[in-house]
Amino acid sequence: METEGQFSPTTVAEARDRYESFGPTAQVVVKEVAKAMGLDADEYEERVTSDVVETARDVLFAESLAVTVGTSEEFESWRADTDHEVTVVGSENVDNVVWHAPPFADEAVAATFQSERRAAVGTLRRQAFGRVYSEVV
């Protein structure tokens, strides 16, 4: 088993603080991407909405989450010892699992994968944000 990512909030307040801290970064990222796309000022004003910046903030937050990557056996062992309600996405017939279980939440999320670790980690982080964090940040 190994951990990928650097942020694993232990409280809702810690998650909120981290989410809020990504606001200015999300604005800069969106502005620079719009500039790279060649949007002029009018196009920028028309197309770059608060929803666009919020989406960038959601992604920055989710991509920073620490996740555990292990074999199916390691996951099942962890699962047997946790009190979290675990939602698993993906196939049951694969060798690997990535999961995230915030200590402050009753719910954990997991994604299975055979060989596409990077895709599974990205999927899991989006699932974690949507299922756990979007309600609290």
Image: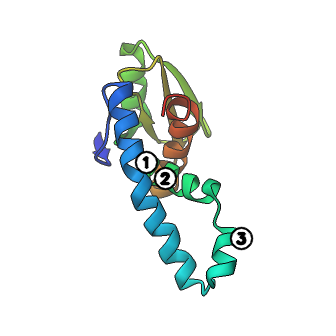
Residue topped by disc 1: 61
Q: Earlier in the sequence, mark 3 or mark 2?
A: 3
**Residue 10, image x, y percentages:** 30, 26
Q: Kindly state the secondary structure of the residue where label 2 is placed.
A: helix
Q: Kindly state the secondary structure of the residue where label 1 is placed.
A: helix
Which residue type carries mark 2? Arg
Which residue type carries mark 1? Phe
Residue topped by disc 2: 57
Cα gap from disc 3 to disc 2, whole angstroms = 19 Å
**Measuring 36% from the left and 30% from the top, which residue is drawn there?**
74
In the foreground, 79 or 23: 23
**Residue 105, image x, y percentages:** 44, 20
The reply to whether residue 109 is in sight is yes
Cα gap from disc 3 to disc 1, whole angstroms = 25 Å
Residue topped by disc 3: 46
**Residue 56, image x, y percentages:** 52, 57
